[in-house]
Image (cartoon, helix red, strand yellow):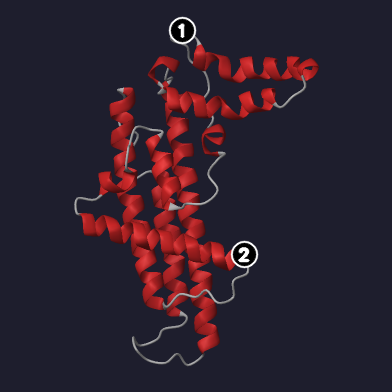
């Protein structure tokens, strides 16, 4: 059973197929309307990357909601995750003038102190604190995102063969790079229907495998029933 985040992704990715059907071109043939074909390719890249990014945020939002439901105590949470959760609050206190820190410290104690007690303590985990640093689904960010949860190399953990892993990394990196270029006004960036299909396959393949891997990892890490 997939996560709700994966269900939503797989449903959303169908939009990419609808876009490509609007400009059906026989492989190797010259498009009837090159400008339309180009626009559809660019739009498909932006839309697919957006769906991919939304999946990642939705996945970890679902993860955190499940942990809160299960009542995970602070001693079960890896130090790296606790540090990440408290990072923004600590930095905000550090940047505040000394005489104005009382209110910030009270807020920190209310939301973060439970993570740092020496005895088991239960509080509310926030996915916002854990994902605030995530700006785009670049492969280096994906590695960092899953490493916080004890998965040292998400690409290696979801692929058995090196060439499959290299292709997966390459397609995802190309997709996000093209999306960023388009978003920043690069009019030269484009994607053929074949490239869009490869990017779509890479995204769905990665998400399906990472979804299973994360469910297993949560069960192992926190000694709980798999969430999906």
The C terminus lies in quadrant: top left
- Few, some or many residues within 10 Å of mark 1 (<14, 14–19, 20+): few
Furthest-left residue in this view: 161
Q: Residue furthest right?
A: 99
- Left or right, residue 152 beside residue 70: left
Q: Is residue 57 above or below residue 98?
A: below
What is the number of callouts on the image? 2
Mark 1–mark 2 Cα distance, whole angstroms, equals 47 Å
Q: Which residue is mark 2?
A: 184
Q: Earlier in the sequence, mark 1 or mark 2?
A: 1
The spot of residue 203 in percent (x, y) is 38, 58
**Which image quarter holds the N terminus?**
top left
Image position, residue 88 (x, y; %): 61, 30
Whether residue 225 can be seen here: no
SS state under label 2: loop
**Residue hosting label 1:** 118
Please say if 125 is above or below 127.
above
Task: Give the structural element (helix, strand or loop) at label 1.
Answer: loop
Which residue is depicted at the point 68% across and 27% down? 92
Of the pair 202 and 164, the residue shown nearer to us: 164
| 141 vs 130, nearest the viewer | 141
Give the mark toward the camera: 1 or 2: 2
Q: Residue at x 64, y 19 (%)?
A: 108
Determine the residue positioned at 51% across, 90% down: 33
Horizontal arrangement in the rendering, residue 49 relative to residue 219 (left or right): right
Q: Residues within 10 Å of mark 2 (few under 14, many from 20)?
A: few
Q: Is residue 42 visible?
A: yes
| In-image side of 3 versus 107 (left or right) | left
- Residue under the image location 30 percent in, 22 percent down: 223
């Amino acid at each position: 059973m997939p996560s709700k985040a994966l269900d939503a992704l797989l449903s959303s990715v169908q939009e990419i197929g609808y876009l490509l059907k609007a400009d059906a071109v026989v492989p190797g043939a010259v498009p009837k309307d090159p400008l339309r074909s180009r626009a559809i390719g660019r739009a498909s890249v932006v839309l697919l990357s957006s769906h991919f990014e939304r999946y990642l945020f939705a996945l970890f939002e679902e993860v955190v909601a499940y942990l809160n439901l299960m009542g995970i105590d602070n001693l079960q949470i890896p130090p790296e995750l606790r540090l990440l959760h408290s990072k923004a609050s600590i930095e905000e206190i550090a940047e505040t003038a000394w005489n104005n820190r009382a209110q910030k410290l009270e807020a920190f104690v209310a939301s973060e102190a439970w993570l740092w007690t020496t005895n088991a303590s239960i509080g509310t985990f926030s996915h916002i604190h854990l994902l605030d640093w995530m700006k785009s689904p670049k492969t280096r960010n994906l590695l960092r995102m899953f490493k916080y949860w004890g998965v040292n190399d998400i690409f290696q953990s979801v692929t058995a063969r090196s060439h499959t892993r290299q292709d997966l990394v390459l397609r995802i990196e190309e997709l996000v790079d093209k999306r960023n270029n388009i978003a920043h006004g690069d009019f030269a960036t484009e994607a053929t229907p074949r490239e869009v299909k490869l990017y779509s396959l890479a995204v769905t393949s990665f998400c399906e495998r990472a979804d299973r891997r994360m469910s297993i990892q949560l069960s192992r890490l926190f000694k709980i029933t798999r969430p999906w």
